[in-house]
Image (cartoon, rainbow, N blue to C red):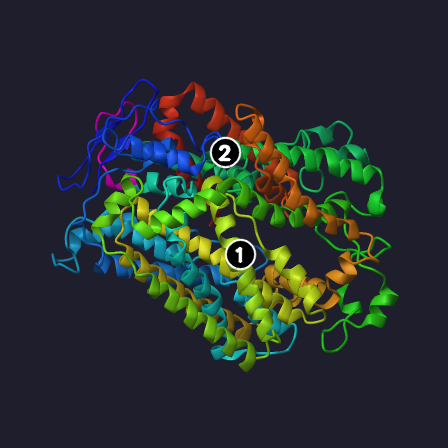
């Protein structure tokens, strides 16, 4: 397949190993002293332009990525003769994409949802592909030779496009079961496809900014590539266990171990030993409780719990880990207790941590008591029932979410504005970036007009959807939703590409349409889907495009694979959802257990709160939570002093502060609990600082494959 270069300790040259002779490559001898560690510290340590200038200055004697993490995992060689349009790729990709779509959609309706991840496909298709290599007669299409890594990557990419349940299924389910309106097959499939393909069209146009630049790392891809290469490369000049052997050790170990916290000894998942000191002490339980408290001194020994909200800490840069950790401590362990024990917003009427909503008497909120027969808000009933209340923690995290959204814009302009302009000029001049971009010049690129065409068709069909079916979103609402997505895609994409964390637009979109179009719950959730999910899908596609860039997948093969996987998943999602709603009596109620639809019911509650009740009642002038609106301004301003200080004192710690990361990651609590953050930080600090600093050779060889093995073991054991 392809060779690679592995970066080891600072005084060693990278080791090269290969398994085939047909390479496009430039031999390299790079020491890790030549290029400073960019991702581990901060994107502010060097600007993107400085980083890539360093790359260009050394191109004559070093042809590899200037990023150490990438050099460690990604090959700087390619074999363009490897076949990709094969029967194995298409058959395995389509079958497993359909299977993942069906299974994940089926279990989405159950009380305890089961999700099969693309890692499962990545693991299962390797032995199946090798078996097909042995038993299918040789043929250019059916069996052109050894099952290669590019086929394997495309199969996994197709699965990655199909494993997530389409967000539009929430609208279809809620509208049919809770609002008594059926979009049918036509409206359903067009709603699903348009919300997905709008993002696909935008993804292709972002390639010059989020895929081609070396500094746009997309760390989550590194663990996947490490696993792919452990399957498909032969390692030479390698001390210790090979990566595939190490993967096997860690995978089997995690698979066996997960049965303890997952099934037999679930106390290992949420272990609040401090509560044992005095179980009857309410304050101690609030501060140290792991599930319903702030998780101080609590621990978890469950990898699934550690990675459930912030992904694997073994692939996140150290500067991002430190920012998230600092933000978590300040918000969850300092500010929230101060709010609660000062009884701000009558906080002590409610639990210290929950996403549940209440009335002003401290009772759980009952939507049915404020809605009329048409499932719309009745102002008189609302006035009788009382104003909506939430915990101080929940209210404050809304404010943090508001600040996180606006801080993204300021941060991007200050820290990356010049680089975006420079990248635009480079894209116009067709100038090559690092070695990976050079190697990709061997393949015809997908023309921009292909992606523009998909975007325009999806945009046009979206208008048909909102006018032909009972969506209730006006034309200007659709345009506004897509404009919001377009404005935030590049700033959020840069943050995700560097830090492996994606800030969401769900709160912003719900907030805007709630003010602009109050009393329309279906319009509210549809606006959110077009505004937030189109951006989310776009960046999912961009991440896969970067995976293809690293693994030298022909761009047109990647285009068709993503297109087919997305279209197929939409059909399977809708068919499965329709079948379940047609055949299971009283689905999404307690009488239909286990098909109680927790996600759909949460989505319905959001439609009522943001659409029917609306942000005017929640955060308007008469609400006790109105001060949270100031966080929009706070988020806009607060990156400025840190940017100024980082420029004035370039050798001080100010350059490491990443305000959007601090705000947007901690804004996930609740439903995330503090224990998810504290143990994630601990694991990340151990691997990305201690192990990397004091056991560099081990970290270089095994860190990313360990992450892939742990995730895979949990994924298989959890099913």
- Inspect this view and state whether residue 290 appears: yes
Q: Position of residue 606 (x, y in %)?
A: 67, 61
Question: In this picture, is 230 found above or below 101?
Answer: above
Secondary structure found at label 2: loop
| Magenta highlight range | 229-243
- Residue at image coords 55%, 35%: 680
- Residue at image coords 79%, 53%: 626
Left or right relative to 585: residue 100: left
Relative to the observer, which residue lies in front, 14 or 493? 493
Corner quadrant of residue 302: top right
How busy is the neighbourhood of tag 1: few (under 14 within 10 Å), some, or many (20 plus)?
Answer: few
- Residue at image coords 53%, 54%: 488
Question: In this picture, is 471 found above or below 109?
Answer: below
Report if residue 234 lies within the magenta region. yes
Relative to the observer, which residue lies in front, 591 or 159? 159
Which of the image's four quarters has the N terminus?
A: top left
Q: Position of residue 252 (x, y in %)?
A: 39, 37
Report if residue 551 lies within the magenta region. no
Q: What numbered label is drawn on residue 44?
A: 2
Q: What numbered label is drawn on residue 447?
A: none
Q: Position of residue 269 (x, y in %)?
A: 59, 38
Q: What numbered label is drawn on residue 487?
A: 1
């Amino acid at each position: 397949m392809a060779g690679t270069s592995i970066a080891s300790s600072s005084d060693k040259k990278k080791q090269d190993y290969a398994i085939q002779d047909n390479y496009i490559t430039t031999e390299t001898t790079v020491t890790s002293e030549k290029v400073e560690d960019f991702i581990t510290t901060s994107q502010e340590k060097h600007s993107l332009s400085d980083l890539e200038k360093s790359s260009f200055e050394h191109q004559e004697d070093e042809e590899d990525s200037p990023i150490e993490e990438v050099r460690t995992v990604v090959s700087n060689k390619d074999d363009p003769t490897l076949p990709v349009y094969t029967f194995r790729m298409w058959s395995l990709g389509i079958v497993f994409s359909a299977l993942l779509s069906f299974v994940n959609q089926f279990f989405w309706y159950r009380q305890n949802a089961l999700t099969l991840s693309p890692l499962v496909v990545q693991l299962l298709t390797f032995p199946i592909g090798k078996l097909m290599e042995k038993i299918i007669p040789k043929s250019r299409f059916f069996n052109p030779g050894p099952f290669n890594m590019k086929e394997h990557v495309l199969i996994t990419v197709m699965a990655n496009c199909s494993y997530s349940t389409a967000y539009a299924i929430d609208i279809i389910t809620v509208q049919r079961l809770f609002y008594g309106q059926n979009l049918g097959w036509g409206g359903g499939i067009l709603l699903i496809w348009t919300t997905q393909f709008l993002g696909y069209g935008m993804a292709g146009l972002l390639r010059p900014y989020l895929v081609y630049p070396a500094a746009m790392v997309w760390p989550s891809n590194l663990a996947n590539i490490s696993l792919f290469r452990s399957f498909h490369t032969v390692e030479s000049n390698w001390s210790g266990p090979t990566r595939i052997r190490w993967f096997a050790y860690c995978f089997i170990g995690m698979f066996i171990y997960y049965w303890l916290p997952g099934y037999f000894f679930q106390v290992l998942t949420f272990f609040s030993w401090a509560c044992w000191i005095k179980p009857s002490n309410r304050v101690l339980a609030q501060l140290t409780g792991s599930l319903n408290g702030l998780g101080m001194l609590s621990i978890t020994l469950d990898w699934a719990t550690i990675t459930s909200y912030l992904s694997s800490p073994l692939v996140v840069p150290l500067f991002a880990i430190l920012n998230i950790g600092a933000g978590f401590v300040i918000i969850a362990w300092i500010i929230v207790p101060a709010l609660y024990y000062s009884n701000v917003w009558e906080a002590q009427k409610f639990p210290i941590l929950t996403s549940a909503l209440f009335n002003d008497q401290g009772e759980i909120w009952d939507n049915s008591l404020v809605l009329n027969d048409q499932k719309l808000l009745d102002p008189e009933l609302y006035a009788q029932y009382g104003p909506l209340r939430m915990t101080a923690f929940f209210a404050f995290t809304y404010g943090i979410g508001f600040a996180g959204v606006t801080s993204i814009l300021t941060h991007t302009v200050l820290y990356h504005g010049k680089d975006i302009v420079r990248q635009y000029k480079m894209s116009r001049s067709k100038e090559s970036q690092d070695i990976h971009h050079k190697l990709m010049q061997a393949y015809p690129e997908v023309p921009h007009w292909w992606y523009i065409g998909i975007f325009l068709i999806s945009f046009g069909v979206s208008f048909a959807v909102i006018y032909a079916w009972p969506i209730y979103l006006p034309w200007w609402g659709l345009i506004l939703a897509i404009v919001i997505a377009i404005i935030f895609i590049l700033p959020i994409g840069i943050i995700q590409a560097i830090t492996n964390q994606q800030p969401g637009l769900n709160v912003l979109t719900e907030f805007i349409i709630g003010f602009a179009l109050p009393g329309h719950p279906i319009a509210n959730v549809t606006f959110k889907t077009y505004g937030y999910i189109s951006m989310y899908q776009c960046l999912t596609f961009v991440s896969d495009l970067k995976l293809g860039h690293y693994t030298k997948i022909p761009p047109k093969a990647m285009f068709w694979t993503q297109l087919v996987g997305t279209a197929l998943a939409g059909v399977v999602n809708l068919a499965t959802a329709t079948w379940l709603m047609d055949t299971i009596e009283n689905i999404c109620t307690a009488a239909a257990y286990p098909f109680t639809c927790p996600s759909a019911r949460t989505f319905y509650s959001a439609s009522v709160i943001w659409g029917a009740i609306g942000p005017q009642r929640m955060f308007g002038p008469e609400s006790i939570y109105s001060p949270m609106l100031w966080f929009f301004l706070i988020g806009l301003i607060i990156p400025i002093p840190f940017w100024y200080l980082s420029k004035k004192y370039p050798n001080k710690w100010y350059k490491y502060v990443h305000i959007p990361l601090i705000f947007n990651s901690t804004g996930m609590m609740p439903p995330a609990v503090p224990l998810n953050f504290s143990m994630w930080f601990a694991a990340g600090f151990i691997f990305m600082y201690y192990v990397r600093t004091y056991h560099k050779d081990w970290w270089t060889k095994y860190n990313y494959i360990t992450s892939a093995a742990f995730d895979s073991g949990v994924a298989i054991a959890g099913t």
